Image (spheres, helix red, strand yellow):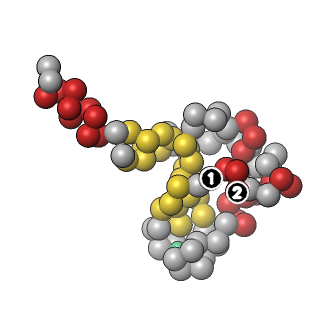
Amino acid sequence: MRFVSMNWSPGYLNVCPQHTDIEVKCTCCGEQKPFDRHTVPPLFRHALIEDIEPRLRCSSCGAKAAKMLFGSYVDDAAGTNRLLSR
Ligand SMILES: [Zn+2]
């Protein structure tokens, strides 16, 4: 599985469609991890994405330089299998 960013932001977290997958990238060290929207405190559920990003601390380097990426997970292996079975 591979995360593909749509290069798009919903603006507010609460209007982000449930089928949209979110990852957070540290612009300081490059670490990128899946983001679980359910871990966001209730106070920030209706917050602007740009207000949430500065509050996310990188677990690798400790920097507060998060960038939220919106997209979906693509299963490369399944795509390959489809091609082979044709
Ligand atoms: Zn980092």
Dot 1 lies on which element?
A: loop
Q: Residue at x 57, y 37 (%)?
A: 20
Q: Residue at x 56, y 58 (%)?
A: 24
Q: Please name the residue that numbered disc 2 is placed on.
A: 39
Q: Give the spatial CA distance, label 1 vs label 2.
A: 6 Å
> The C terminus appears in which quarter of the rendering?
top left
Circle 1/circle 2 CB separation < 8 Å: yes
**Residue 49 pos. (x, y %):** 71, 51
**Residue 48 pos. (x, y %):** 76, 49
Q: Please name the residue that numbered disc 1 is placed on.
A: 36
In screen coordinates, is 25 left or right of 80?
A: right
Q: Residue at x 50, y 60 (%)?
A: 33
Answer above or below: position of 70 versus 32.
Answer: above
Q: Residue furthest right?
A: 43
- Dot 1 crowding, Cα within 10 Å, few <14, some 14–19, many 20+: few
Residue type marked 1 = Asp
- Dot 2 crowding, Cα within 10 Å, few <14, some 14–19, many 20+: few
Answer above or below: position of 42 versus 11.
Answer: below
The CB of the residue at mark 1 lies under 8 Å from ligand 1: no
Depth check: give the residue in front, 25 or 21: 21
**Residue 42 pos. (x, y %):** 83, 53
